[in-house]
Image (cartoon, rainbow, N blue to C red):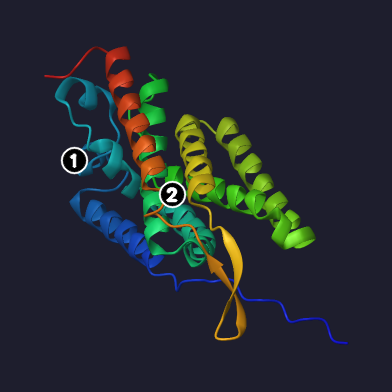
Amino acid sequence: MNPPEPLRLPTWRPRWVWVFLGINIVVWLLMTAAGGSESRRVLITFGANVPSRIVEQGEVWRLFTANFLHIGVVHLFFNSYALYALGPEMEALFGPARFVAIYLLSGLSGSIASFALNTNVGLSAGASTALFGVVGTMIAYFIRNRSHFGARGAQRLNSYVAMAAINFFLGLSIPGIDTLGHVGGFVGGLILGWLLCPFYRVEVRDGQPRVVDLNSLRSEWLGVALFVVLLAAGVVGGIAQQGGVPR
């Protein structure tokens, strides 16, 4: 008797990965044309995370825009490669709505952690906060679905944990890297990944068993909304810690 064929997981074709990758490249090109992506003036003009500007002038939008800026071509290359290597799998498994929500919100959580907890950083930028969120999300995915994937899933989980550990170690070893931003993005991705992780069940449709995903951004909107409230509280707390409410 032949063993039953494995059922295919429901997946989506990645699209938003390429949108975010394109945005990062276009913004870098515009920065280069404006005077160079390593110029402090250009970085501030394009929206880098500058705590003093957030506190003194209320420019909280920098916490969002900083995630699309890169300081030099090497910074852009490594983050672009990481998005190219890690993003498609996550978007394929989670779908476009959940991917976009997790990518943007984990990027924000990293920016806010950097702003609220690290008073020594004068300026920060880069997509690595969101990319650490992707890693945290995939760790949550393989933990929650460990009963489905067995030894292969455990191997994938270990590879993502090792990836996170190595990059955190490098962040602590190399001067100028915003480690708190990476930690904030990772924790944000872990929480959101746990919340929005696909929940699989086998259903029989038209006489054929199929794997369906019962989770979605729509069904978990309340948890995501509470996460956004926590992010807002982090911004308010960071402003209060660094000099009061901006005018």
Q: Residues within 10 Å of mark 1 (few under 14, many from 20)?
A: few
Question: What secondary structure is marked by label 2?
Answer: helix
Q: Residue at x 84, y 86 (%)?
A: 2
Q: Residues within 10 Å of mark 2 (few under 14, many from 20)?
A: some
Q: Residue at x 69, y 57 (%)?
A: 156
Q: Which quadrant is home to the C terminus?
A: top left
Horizontal and vertical percent position of residue 51 = 29, 25
Question: What secondary structure is marked by label 1?
Answer: helix
Q: Which quadrant is home to the N terminus?
A: bottom right
First along the sequence among labels 2 and 1: 1
Q: Amino acid at mark 1?
A: Thr
Horizontal and vertical percent position of residue 36 = 27, 48
- Residue 122 sits in quarter: top left
Residue occupied by mark 1 = 45
Horizontal and vertical percent position of residue 29 = 27, 58
Q: Is residue 201 above or below residue 70?
A: below
Q: Is residue 213 above or below residue 6?
A: above
Residue occupied by mark 2 = 75
Q: Can residue 118 be seen from the camera position used here?
A: no
Q: Residue at x 59, y 37 (%)?
A: 168
Of 147 and 39, nearer the camera is 147
Q: Can residue 91 be seen from the camera position used here?
A: yes
Residues under numbered marks 2 and 1 in contact, where contact means CB atoms less than 8 Å apart:
no
